[in-house]
Every structure is written in structure tokens, then in C-alpha cells.
Image (cartoon, rainbow, N blue to C red):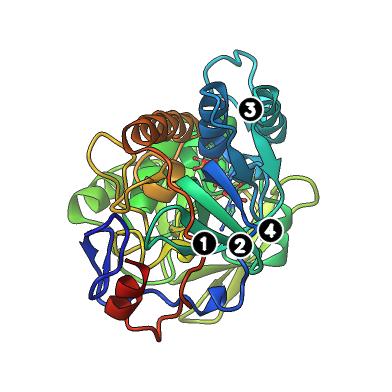
């Protein structure tokens, strides 16, 4: 089978049950679409690092910045654990520097979100903001993951000012203070236990009366004197103007509300959502939507498509690990391109739609 040709629902050799919906491509004229060696999707630490490396390899990468240019670190203040900044650096400033460094070597950063992809054959086809067609010899997916928040107005306003979703990143700022962790799974147990290294007291607020976390993680947390569990409890407001000064919580059994005015930090540990929706059905993912990469590489199941950063990592989720895999993706893409060469788009392509018979469509192209 020619690389990328759909046969009976097979995408680049990986069996899929249903060919992803391609109706968004109907009527889009690709005849004048730009063709790039490398398209990088996302501009967090992973995307900018991939851009830096591919730009220095003269691959003239185009980088789409997506809904959150600079990524998650633009929502935080001090970053103290990125090597090379002994005094720490503000998250947005750090991402500006990543951007500047990638552009210095020729990365072409563009506003726009990749909304649809067609990975049936090379060059890969992408739609930016539902309408702009682009061809790519290789694609590096660095779309990150979004931490889940409760959705309260004051919680959103105080993100980076006492509200955070990253204990590893922000725990050290709460030395000697009292903090609250929301959640009941393994991450909540791990984060609350970790926070006791710094905080004098850690409340675990859980909306049920039992935890989802594994027994061993629960036991570890139960045995920690600094952790206090507050059951059947939900946060209904976060108090404070420029910093968190307390929480308003409700007991969902009794309906009683109260203020916890000793809390100066709120840590959400209710999961992350990888931003991988446009790639669903094309790239192999785990049950939560994280892209699966081949061991010790950034290769996905689709040849010429690589994944880096939090979009493929639900374990470490750090700027430095995202940057590391961004570098790997750039090197993987460069070598892959060297080995597989470049292909030109076909002059006239058949109508693409899920309603097409994939076998007939493949035959029409051959
Ligand atoms: C509050 C907070 C504080 C943190 N503090 C630290 C810290 O101190 N130290 C640390 O190491 N880590 C920290 N982290 C974690 C760190 O931010 C992430 O691990 C890192 O940003 C992941 O990088 P990434 O490049 O994979 O993705 P992200 O930073 O999530 O960037 C994703 C990028 O993809 C883009 N995108 C998404 N979908 C599309 C699309 N369809 N088309 C085009 N673009 C798209 C977005 O616009 C964004 O630019 C923190 C996280 C949070 C939330």
C-alpha cells in the first residue's frame, strides 16, 4: 500500500474502525495551498523547541500558534525550575524568549488554529481556522494539554495568583502556609503528599466520601499528619483580590457553607484534557486522548507525523520535558524527511469525504 492511502479504513497502515470525517475539506481549493517541509502545531515549550531545531536545520518550519500563543506558561507567574534561569523567570517572558529564539533562525510563526487534518497520504493536508488550506511534508503536533478547573469566576481570575493546577511547579511558593487540593484520584494524593514538603497544612477537598485513588496512594496520604481530608465538600468561591485569601466551600450532604480563611493556595488536581481533538481518528491515542508515540521516539502511527510535549505525556508535564520532546520531534522529522524524501501534491484530487468509498477513492488516485 502506498504510504497514507486509505484502504478499508486503514490510515497509513494502522487499522481504524471509521475513516475520520473529511467533510470540512469539501469545496476547499488546495491547488494554490502552500507546501511546507514542517508544520508545527502549537507554541508552548514543545512547539517552540521543535521550531528552533527545525529552523536551524534549514527546514523553514511554519508554526501555528493556536488559541493560546505561548501555551500554558503564559498563565503563570514565576517559573523557578527551568534550567538556565537561576533567579527564575516569569512564564510569559520565558515564552517570549522561546519565540524570539525560534524566529531568529527563521521559524515562521503564524496566528491560527489547526482545525482539521487529512493524513491519508503525503503531503498531509491541514485546514487552518476551518478554511485556510496548507500542505505539510511532516507535521509536529505540540498542542499541549489543558488543566481542568472548576470554572468559577474568581478561580479563573486568580490563576497564577494562588490558584494553580501544578503542584510540582508551584508547591515551593507555599512554604509554611496552608493550602487546599481539590480531587480524589491518584494525582490529588500525589500532589497533596508532595505539598506537605512545603506547606504546614494541606486540606484535601473531595466531593465524595471516598477516594478514587489507588489504595497505596490513599494510605500514604492518610498517614501524613499534615494532610486533612474534608469529605463531601465542594469549592463554591475563591476569595481574594490579588492573591488567594480563602475559600468558600459547601458540604453537599448538609448544604452548609463555610469560609476556610486559612487557605492561601488552591491546587486543582482534577485532571488534564489533551488538546488533540483535530487528530482524533488519525493518530493513535490512549483512552484520555493523549497521543501514543512509539517507544523512545516521537513517531506516531502516521508516517511523517510526530508528537511532542504534554499532548503525548500525561506523566511528567513539565516545560523542560516538553522542550526535550520538542527537540526529539524536530530531529525525528528531519531524519524522516531525509530518508523518505519530499512528495508533490497531486494536481487534481478526488472529492474527499467520509461518504466516499475509501477503496474507490484510493483506486481513483492510483
Ligand atoms: C499554572 C501552571 C503553572 C505551571 N508552571 C510550571 C513551572 O513552573 N515549570 C514547569 O516546568 N512547568 C510548569 N507548568 C507545566 C507546563 O506549562 C507544561 O508542561 C508545558 O507548557 C507543556 O508544553 P507544551 O508545549 O506541550 O504545551 P502547552 O504549553 O500547553 O502549549 C500548547 C500550545 O498548542 C497550541 N494549540 C493547541 N491546540 C492547537 C491547534 N489545534 N492548533 C494550533 N495550536 C494549538 C496552544 O495555543 C499552545 O500554544 C505549569 C502549568 C500550569 C497550567
Closest to the camera, between mark 2 and mark 3, is 2
Label for residue 8? Answer: none
Label for residue 102? Answer: 3
Q: Mark 4 points at which residue?
A: 156
Q: Which of marks 4 and 3 is nearer the N terminus?
A: 3
Q: Which of marks 2 and 3 is nearer the N terminus?
A: 2
Closest to the camera, between mark 1 and mark 3, is 1
| Horizontal arrangement in the rendering, residue 318 relative to residue 1 (left or right) | right
Q: Is mark 3 on a helix, strand or loop?
A: helix
Label for residue 347? Answer: 1
For the residues labelled 1 and 2, say whether their Cβ atoms are less than 8 Å apart. yes
Q: Earlier in the sequence, mark 1 or mark 4?
A: 4
| Horizontal arrangement in the rendering, residue 4 relative to residue 351 (left or right) | left
Q: Which of marks 2 and 4 is nearer the N terminus?
A: 2
Q: Earlier in the sequence, mark 1 or mark 3?
A: 3
For the residues labelled 1 and 4, say whether their Cβ atoms are less than 8 Å apart. no
Closest to the camera, between mark 1 and mark 2, is 1
| Residue 94 sits in quarter | top right
For ligand 1, which image quadrant applies? top right
Q: Name the residue under label 2.
A: 31
Q: Is 276 in front, or is 122?
A: 122
Q: Is 44 in front, or is 106?
A: 106
Number of marks in the rendered image: 4
Amino acid at each position: 500500500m502506498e504510504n497514507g492511502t486509505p484502504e478499508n479504513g486503514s490510515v497509513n497502515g494502522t487499522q481504524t474502525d471509521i475513516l475520520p470525517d473529511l467533510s470540512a475539506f469539501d469545496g476547499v481549493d488546495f491547488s494554490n495551498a502552500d507546501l511546507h517541509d514542517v508544520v508545527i502545531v502549537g507554541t508552548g515549550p514543545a512547539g517552540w523547541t521543535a521550531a528552533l531545531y527545525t529552523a536551524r536545520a534549514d527546514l523553514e518550519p511554519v508554526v501555528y500558534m493556536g488559541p493560546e500563543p505561548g501555551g500554558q506558561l503564559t498563565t503563570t507567574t514565576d517559573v523557578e525550575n527551568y534550567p538556565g534561569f537561576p533567579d527564575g523567570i516569569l512564564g510569559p517572558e520565558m515564552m517570549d524568549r522561546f519565540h524570539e529564539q525560534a524566529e531568529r533562525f527563521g521559524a515562521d510563526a503564524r496566528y491560527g488554529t489547526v482545525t482539521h487534518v487529512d493524513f491519508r497520504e503525503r503531503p498531509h493536508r491541514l485546514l487552518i481556522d476551518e478554511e485556510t488550506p496548507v500542505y505539510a511534508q511532516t507535521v509536529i503536533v505540540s498542542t499541549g494539554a489543558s488543566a481542568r478547573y472548576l470554572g468559577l469566576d474568581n478561580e479563573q481570575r486568580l490563576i497564577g495568583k494562588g490558584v494553580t493546577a501544578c503542584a510540582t511547579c508551584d508547591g515551593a511558593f507555599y512554604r509554611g502556609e496552608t493550602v487546599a487540593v481539590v480531587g480524589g484520584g491518584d494525582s490529588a494524593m500525589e500532589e497533596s503528599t508532595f505539598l506537605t514538603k512545603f506547606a504546614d497544612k494541606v486540606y484535601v477537598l473531595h466531593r465524595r466520601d471516598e477516594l478514587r485513588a489507588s489504595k497505596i496512594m490513599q494510605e500514604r496520604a492518610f498517614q501524613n499528619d499534615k494532610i486533612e481530608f474534608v469529605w463531601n465538600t465542594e469549592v463554591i468561591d475563591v476569595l481574594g483580590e490579588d492573591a488567594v485569601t480563602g475559600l468558600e466551600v459547601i458540604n453537599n450532604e448538609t448544604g452548609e457553607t463555610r469560609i476556610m480563611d486559612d487557605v492561601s493556595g488552591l491546587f486543582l488536581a482534577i485532571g488534564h484534557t489533551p488538546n488533540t481533538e483535530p487528530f482524533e481518528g488519525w493518530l493513535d491515542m490512549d483512552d484520555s486522548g493523549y497521543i501514543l508515540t512509539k517507544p523512545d521516539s516521537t513517531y506516531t502511527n502516521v508516517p511523517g507525523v510526530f508528537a511532542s510535549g504534554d499532548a503525548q505525556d500525561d506523566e511528567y508535564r513539565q516545560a523542560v520535558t516538553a522542550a526535550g520532546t520538542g527537540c526529539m520531534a524536530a530531529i525525528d522529522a528531519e531524519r524522516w524527511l531525509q530518508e523518505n524524501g519530499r512528495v508533490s501534491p497531486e494536481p487534481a484530487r478526488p472529492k474527499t469525504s467520509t461518504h466516499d468509498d475509501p477503496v474507490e477513492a484510493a483506486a481513483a488516485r492510483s
